Image (tube, grey):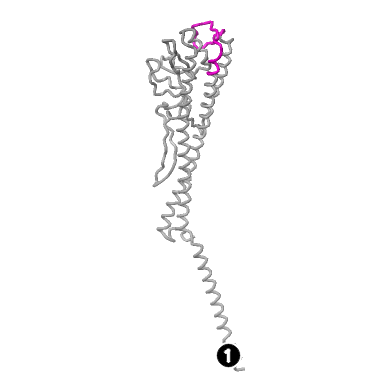
Amino acid sequence: MRVATASDDAAYWSIATTMRSDVGAMEAVSDSVGLAQGIVNTTYAAMETVRDSFVDIRNLAITASNMPQPGMRDVILPGFSLDPEYAKSDVYKIDVRMQKLQDQARESMMSASFAGVNMIYHSKTEDVKASEQVFSFVIGYSDGKVQKMDVKAMDTLLLNDAFGSYPTTYPGEFNPEKTLFDGNDIFDAPGSYTPASIYWYNIPLSNPDTGDPESYPVSKTQILQSIENHVVRHGSDRQGLYNNLVNMIDEKIQALTSKMAYVGSVQTALAMHDEKNLRMIDTVNRGVGRLVDADMAEESARLRALQTQQQLSVSALNIANSAPQNIMQLFN
């Protein structure tokens, strides 16, 4: 090594030491980028599962719309209770299959966690509101500064079980905490002045102890029963109502697809930063080598020259030693 300590060349040694320190930081950044990629890849995979589930839900809604209208014993149903007459119908069987797909999607959202980070599900136990949450990923190191990429939670979240903590005064009022599948979706019901409404996973209510607004999970939402009940109770057009339901689910799928596209762009950005960081590490390592390591070609040529010089010196010494003997032979 040409420069091993500061005494060999203070300037080169100082520069090389700083560059080695930068390499250490960049290697730590590379590990962080790998972690970020794991988080984002997990997010995207879960989104794919959710999207597939809701595509199947939409298709089942189309199937149910072509089935005979089921009977309904109770026009006014308490909460999400199951109507016994409706439970005998084929539409109910479709409703059960839809509920399983909803549960599958929810499980995918809740389990989409990598290294303790979940970008699509926000629980009530989070320390920060969903609207204020930011996912920050380390992507680089340059000029002594760590570079980060921020992703707003509301750009990726699909479900926020704490959305009901934001007080609203009327249905459909803007709620900055509401994500794609929170609360209810309200849509027109042809033939009726009363719009239809369905819930996917949670419902905003008041806390019975404090009176504060809060959201609570709903395990069985009976979506198709809500549609069929609306037809009986409010006289809406059944086929038109089903068409609007399918259109609303399509809008959900499109919104989810847009979020997936955004997450995909984050994946691409992380891959680019990872590649850039690895190239920088290689470049800096090469630079350090040029500063402090010996030039092997130059050192090899120098060694050959020294070996040749040594051989010539030995030959000259041999000649000098043999000269007196030659002179003595002449006298003899």
- Location of the C terminus (image quadrant): bottom right
Camera-nearest residue between 93 and 19: 93
Look at the image and tell me whether residue 124 can be seen: no
Q: Position of residue 250 (x, y in %)?
A: 48, 23
**Residue 37 in view in this figure:** yes
Q: Is residue 287 above or below residue 207?
A: below
Q: How many marks?
A: 1
In this figure, which residue is indicated by the disc labeled 1? 327
Question: Which residue does the image show at 56% across and 11% down from the upper left?
Answer: 68
Q: Please state the horizontal and vertical placement of residue 72, each as a whole percent of the image.
A: 53, 7
Q: Which region of the structure is painted magenta?
A: 61-85
What main secondary structure does the magenta stretch of the protein show?
loop
Q: Is residue 321 magenta?
A: no
Residue displayed at 41% across by 54% down: 15
What residue type is disc 1 on?
Answer: Ile
Label 1 element class: helix
